[in-house]
Image (tube, rainbow, N blue to C red):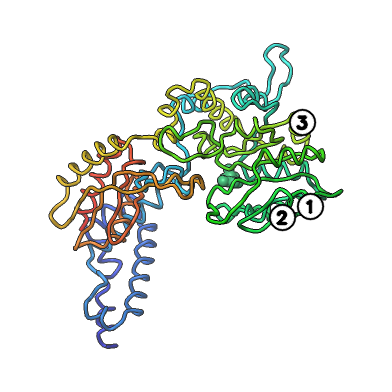
């Protein structure tokens, strides 16, 4: 066996031989001799290690490809990835609409224009046009947020995590916050209600059981040290079965009886009821305000479909305190966020057709017929492109809302399953990710899945071209 290994190792081409190849010369011209040599050495090192770690079966099957052309193509791929921007546009074929790792919401046309305008020009960020005096950047969106939500006041910070931190730091430092045990939420690993609570200096006072909490549980926990009652929307999970939660209205009545505020972290925070498009009921921001909540926070880039932001709305006396808090200065948003957010919010002034203008809502409410028509177009394109080595099929499937919204909702969709006897799906998925533009798919049961919900028509050609490249490289 060790003989086999040694002779296999000897087959690894020399750096100079690789450089002498046509492709080697091309790469020298494009990236320079030094960088190319470094990259080749590093890849050869990895190949050597693979051979050293290989089992007898792997050695015999010669699974590690040492052809010069193959090695140089891999080096070229790595150099391309290195040279391109780290943050680049991608094609989202996963079907997850609010995909946090791929940047959550796409912006509306109007928000794109607003961003461009504010990036090219000076702007009225902090100036009062009437007096010419210094103004406040909060005023940019405060008016429209009040108008849309019915709240007395509003404030915007960097994201919803920052919003919750600012709210608790301002209203509950060194005091107790009452929260239901069923609502100690963790979002994406880095946001955990107990940790945010600790950071703010507030003391957590859990009440009830995981599945059931009664109003009397809250009532019994209220004492001198209590600062507020916190309700957190369990956006990324659902407690089902033998369950009970106190309603927002009940909490408001109870808290106000003791002169305490109720705070709600709504998470996704939608301004429109999406039930007419077949999604299940989620409380809207306006409903919570109408129910008397004192302060409410939600994300700008989840169901709202705008830029990353943490939006705080509610009673003026509390919001005024937050505006004054030192932490607010550290969490403040920039002009790009404000520009994109104002334009996004302006779309909600006219609810008719808003789900067409906000990309996140559009992808969530697109009809099954439309998805099918799109899927058939892409299917045709792929069938024409791909040889008989591939199986390409259209079928019904499910997509996800994402962003920790509607955790149990399975949106009906059409997907294209792509599989091959000749290529592993893992390799194909990686090649697609390394394509320019990168394409992100789902893998399910040995098939690559293209979910039409998040694929734009303009992406079709790019997907076909990506396969053309991948197959040419082989
Ligand atoms: C998403 C979410 C957050 C965090 O919001 P970011 O805008 O990502 O900081 C906080 N609370 C809940 C309930 C959420 O769903």
Q: Indicate which label's residue lies in the foreground, 1 or 3.
A: 1
Residue 224 coordinates in the image, percent (x, y): 87, 48
User: Left or right: where does residue 300 sit relative to residue 398?
Assistant: right
Q: Quadrant of ligand 1?
A: top right
Q: Kindly indicate the quadrant of the structure image that contains residue 19.
A: bottom left
Q: Kindly indicate the quadrant of the structure image that contains residue 13.
A: bottom left
Residue 93 coordinates in the image, percent (x, y): 34, 46
User: Left or right: where does residue 152 sit relative to residue 120?
Assistant: right
Q: Which residue: 63% across, 24% down?
A: 140
Pointers 1 and 3 in contact (C-beta within 8 Å): no
Q: Quadrant of the C terminus?
A: bottom left
Pointers 1 and 2 in contact (C-beta within 8 Å): yes
Task: Say which residue label 3 marks.
Answer: 320
Identify the element where label 3 is drawn.
helix
> What's the distance in space between the residues labelled 1 and 2, CA to CA?
9 Å
Q: Which residue: 32% across, 77% down?
A: 51
Task: Say which residue label 2 marks.
Answer: 207
């Amino acid at each position: 066996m060790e003989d086999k290994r040694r002779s296999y190792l000897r087959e690894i081409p020399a750096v100079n031989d690789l450089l002498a190849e046509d492709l080697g010369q091309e790469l020298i011209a494009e990236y320079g001799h030094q960088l190319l040599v470094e990259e080749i050495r590093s890849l050869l090192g990895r190949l050597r290690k693979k051979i050293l770690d290989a089992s007898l079966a792997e050695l015999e099957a010669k699974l590690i490809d040492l052809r010069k052309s193959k090695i140089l193509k891999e080096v070229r791929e790595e150099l391309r990835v290195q040279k391109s921007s780290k943050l680049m546009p991608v094609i989202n074929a996963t079907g997850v609409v609010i995909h946090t790792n791929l940047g959550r919401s796409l912006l509306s046309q109007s928000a794109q224009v607003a961003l461009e305008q504010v990036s090219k020009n000076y702007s009225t960020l902090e100036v009062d046009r009437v007096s010419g005096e210094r103004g406040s950047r909060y005023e940019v969106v405060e008016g429209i947020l009040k108008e849309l939500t019915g709240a007395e006041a509003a404030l915007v910070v960097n994201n919803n995590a920052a919003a919750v931190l600012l709210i608790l730091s301002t209203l509950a430092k060194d005091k107790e916050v009452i929260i239901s045990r069923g609502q100690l939420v963790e979002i994406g690993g880095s946001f955990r209600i107990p940790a945010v609570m600790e950071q703010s200096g507030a003391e957590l006072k859990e009440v009830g059981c995981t599945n059931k909490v009664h109003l009397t549980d809250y009532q019994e926990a209220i004492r001198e040290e209590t600062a507020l009652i916190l309700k957190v929307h369990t956006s990324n999970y659902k407690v089902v079965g033998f369950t009970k939660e106190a309603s927002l209205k009940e909490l408001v009545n109870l808290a106000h009886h003791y002169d305490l505020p109720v705070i709600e972290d709504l998470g996704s925070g939608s301004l429109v009821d999406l039930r007419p498009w077949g999604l299940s009921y989620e409380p809207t921001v306006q409903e919570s305000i109408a129910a008397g909540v004192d302060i409410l926070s939600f994300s700008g880039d989840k169901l709202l479909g705008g830029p990353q932001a943490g939006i705080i709305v509610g009673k003026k006396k509390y919001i005024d305190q937050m505006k004054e808090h030192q932490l607010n200065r550290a969490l403040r948003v920039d002009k790009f966020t404000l520009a994109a957010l104002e334009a996004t919010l302006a779309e909600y002034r006219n609810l008719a057709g808003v789900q067409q203008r906000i990309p996140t809502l559009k992808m969530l409410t697109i009809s099954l017929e439309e998805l099918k028509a799109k899927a058939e177009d892409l299917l045709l394109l792929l069938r024409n492109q791909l040889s008989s080595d591939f199986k390409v099929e259209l079928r019904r499937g499910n997509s996800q809302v994402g962003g920790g919204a509607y955790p149990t909702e399975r949106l009906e969709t059409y997907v294209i399953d792509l599989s091959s006897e000749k290529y592993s799906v893992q390799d194909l998925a990686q090649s697609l990710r390394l394509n320019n533009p990168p394409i992100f798919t789902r893998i399910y049961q040995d098939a690559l899945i293209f979910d039409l919900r998040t694929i734009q028509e303009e992406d079709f050609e790019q997907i076909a071209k990506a396969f053309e490249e991948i197959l040419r490289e082989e």
